[in-house]
Image (cartoon, helix red, strand yellow):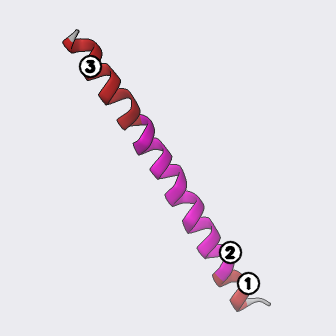
Amino acid sequence: MESFIIASIAFPTGLLGAGLQILEIRVRATLAARTFKVIRP
């Protein structure tokens, strides 16, 4: 039972970490695109 609880906690945490990385990449990409648009309208 303990291993199931650990797995049910660890797995979503890993997914959340991966999701945050993807989100950070998207945010950086949009910021880069915005600055590029400002430089070249």
| Residue 34 place in picture, x, y as percent | 67, 80
Q: Which residue is mark 2?
A: 33
Classify residue 25 by image quadrant: bottom right
Q: Which residue is mark 1?
A: 37
Q: Please tell me whether residue 34 is drawn above or below residue 11 in the rendered image.
A: below
| Residue 22 place in picture, x, y as percent | 53, 50
What type is the residue that disc 1 sits on? Lys
Asked whether residue 16 is drawn in magenta, I would say yes
The mark tally for this picture is: 3
What type is the residue that disc 2 sits on? Ala
Per the model, the C-alpha gap separating discs 3 and 2 is 42 Å
Classify residue 10 by image quadrant: top left
Q: Which residues are magenta?
A: 15-34
Per the model, the C-alpha gap separating discs 1 and 3 is 48 Å
Q: Which SS class for mark 2?
A: helix
Q: Main secondary structure of the magenta part?
A: helix
What type is the residue that disc 3 sits on? Ile
Q: Which is more toward the observer, 15 or 40?
A: 15
* Left or right of residue 27, residue 20 in this image: left
Q: Which SS class for mark 1?
A: helix
Q: Are marks 2 and 1 in contact (CB under 8 Å)?
A: yes
Image quadrant holding the N terminus, namely top left
Q: Which SS class for mark 3?
A: helix
Numbered label attached to residue 5: 3
Point out the frontmost of discs 3 and 2.
Answer: 3
Asked whether residue 4 is drawn in magenta, I would say no
Determine the residue positioned at 26% across, 19% down. Answer: 5
| 1 or 3: tag closer to the N-terminus | 3
Image quadrant holding the C terminus, namely bottom right
